[in-house]
Structures are given as C-alpha cells and as structure tokens.
Image (tube, rainbow, N blue to C red):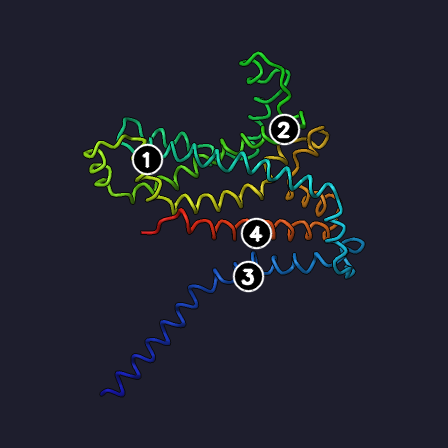
C-alpha cells in the first residue's frame, strides 16, 4: 500500500511539474525572443560595422565605442537626457504623491478626479504631442496668449528640453498617482487616528507616517521613472521637428540611437549607444539600490 501511494505521489508530482512548465513556457518563449535575445544581439552588434545593404557585417572590436566616446554629439545627448530626467522624475513623483494623498481621502467626486488625472495615460502620444505643440506655438499658442509673451518654448535651445520635460511630467502623473494610491491603501488608518489624538498636524502625519510606510512604493516609482526618463524618445521625436534649431540641445541618447540605426542605417553605432545607455542606467540603479537601505522601510 505504501509503495502504491509513493508511486501515485511521484506521478502527481511529475504531472504538476509538466503542467507547470506548459503554463510558464509561453511567457519564457516571449521573454527569450523579445527581450533576452535582442539584448545579446545588440551587444554583439556593437562590435561590428554594418555592411552594405545591412549584410556582411565586419568585426571592428572596440572601434565603435572609441568613435562614440570621442563624438561630442553623444555627450551632448547624454546631458540632454539628464536634463530631461532631472525635471521629469522629481516633479512627476512629488505632484503625483500629493494628488494621491488628497484623492485618498473621502470626498465628493473622488472617482471622477482620479479618472481625470489618469486620462493622459490613455491618450495617444501623437495626440499629446499635437496638443502641446499648439500650446507651445510661439506665434498663436495658448501659453504665450495667456501670459502675453513671445517665448519660443520648443525652438529656443536653452529651454526646449525643459519644455518637453513638462509634457513628460503631465503625461505620467496619472500613472504614478495610481501606484501611490495602491500603496496608501495598505496604510492602517489607526496610525492617523492615534497621531490626531496626539495633536499631530496633517503635514506632520504626512512626513512621519505616510512617507515611511509607503517608502517601498516610492522607491519603486523612483527607480522605474529614472529608467523611463533616461529612455525618453517618443515625446522628443513627435514634438521636435527635424529642422528645429533646438533639436541638438534636446535629442536624447535613444533619439540618437534612432538616428544612427534607422536613418543612417548604421546598426553598429546604434547598438553601441544602446549599450552605453544600458551601462549608465545600471550604474544609477546600483546607487539607488545602495541608497534605499537608508530611507526605505519594509514592514
């Protein structure tokens, strides 16, 4: 009898193992084909010079990296990318966090307000770019009309990248807000009641209760937004025209990759830029992982 039970358990375990792999297999195939293989192929391509008509690649070693690092356009694109991220990341997180706290309270029309702030996330990027290009228009744009000014928002090299970053802040606030709302749902209301009895103000409760308890959510949003900010492409591509005088001071590393790979048909240089951006992101992420030990509190 014991032997039969052991055989049944073994057969059941084998059956569960087989069905488990069958359920996981589609996801694994998708990851390998769409993520893992392209990563290694991009790294491999960065050591080659693209042949004529995209065939017959020639191995050039580190020549692509030397050429990239000696090109001033690469460093300018990196500076542009950091400028964008420095504006988009902190402002989108701070505004979204404040909105999430306000909309987490009981109030009339709370669901409607949440929907309104989330709407930019479901809008097509092309539509967003068209609307903001009209708002930024230096001749008949709404912003210049309201402020009675003549600012060239997206054609002035000094401010164009920051103007694009404002669009990024506006478009991502709703997504960040939803993430913060999910974190706030996990905070026990008893903490706030006890703090109110002790005479703590709303601001004191926010910094002493809310921030520490949702710090894991804040950390997740910070990491993902830094990565997203450094990978910006679509807004710059759709807002900035090719003949725009501010394009050089606005194009990001991903935009430069697009130009090298799909306009100039130089896959080797494009892959090198992607690997360079990957290294930058990995270094920043490592510093974030180290720093989070000092301010993120896991319950």
Q: Nearer the viewer, mark 3 or mark 1?
A: 1
In the displayed structure, does residue 3 sit left or right of residue 147? left
Q: Which image quadrant is residue 252 in? A: top right
> Which element carries disc 2, helix, strand or loop?
helix
142 on left or right of 93 = right
| Mark closest to the chain's N terminus, 1 or 2 | 2
Q: Secondary structure at mark 1?
A: helix
**Which numbered disc flags the more N-terminal residue, 4 or 2?**
2
User: On the image, numbered disc 1 is attached to which residue?
Assistant: 206
Q: Is residue 145 above or below residue 242?
A: above
Query: Percent position (x, y) of residue 122?
Result: 47, 36
Q: Which mark is residue 283?
A: 4
Quarter of the image where one finds residue 147: top right
Distance between the Cα atoms at labels 4 and 1? 31 Å
Label 3 crowd bin: few (<14), some (14–19), many (20+), radius 10 Å: few
Distance from disc 3 to disc 1, alpha carbons, whole Å, reads: 43 Å
Q: Determine which residue is flagged by label 3.
A: 32
User: How much space separates mark 4 and mark 3, taking CA atoms?
Assistant: 24 Å
């Amino acid at each position: 009898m014991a032997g039969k039970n052991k055989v049944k358990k073994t057969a059941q375990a084998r059956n569960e193992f087989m069905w488990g792999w069958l359920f996981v297999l589609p996801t694994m195939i998708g990851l390998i084909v769409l993520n893992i293989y392209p990563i290694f192929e991009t790294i491999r391509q960065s050591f080659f010079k693209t042949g004529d008509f995209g065939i017959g690649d020639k191995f050039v070693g580190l020549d692509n990296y030397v050429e990239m690092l000696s090109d001033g356009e690469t460093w300018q694109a990196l500076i542009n990318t950091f400028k964008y991220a420095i504006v988009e990341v902190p402002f989108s997180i701070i505004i979204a966090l404040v909105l999430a706290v306000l909309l987490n309270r009981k109030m009339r029309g709370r669901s409607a307000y949440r929907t309104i702030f989330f709407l930019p996330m479901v809008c097509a990027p092309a539509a967003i770019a068209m609307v903001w290009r009209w708002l930024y228009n230096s001749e008949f744009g709404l912003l210049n009309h309201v402020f009675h000014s003549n600012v060239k928002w997206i054609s002035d090299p000094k401010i164009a990248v920051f103007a694009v970053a404002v669009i990024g802040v506006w478009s991502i606030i709703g997504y960040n807000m939803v993430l913060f709302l999910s974190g706030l749902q996990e905070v026990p209301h008893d903490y706030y009641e006890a703090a109110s009895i002790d005479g703590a103000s709303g601001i004191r409760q926010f910094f002493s209760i809310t921030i520490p308890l949702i710090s894991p959510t804040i950390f997740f949003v910070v990491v993902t937004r830094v990565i997203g900010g450094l990978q910006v492409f679509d807004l710059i591509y759709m807002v900035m025209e090719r003949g725009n005088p501010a394009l050089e001071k606005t194009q990001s590393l991903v935009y430069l990759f697009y130009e090298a790979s799909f306009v100039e048909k130089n896959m080797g240089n494009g892959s090198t830029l992607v690997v360079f951006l990957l290294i930058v992101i990995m270094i920043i992420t490592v510093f974030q992982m180290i720093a989070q030990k000092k301010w993120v509190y896991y319950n």
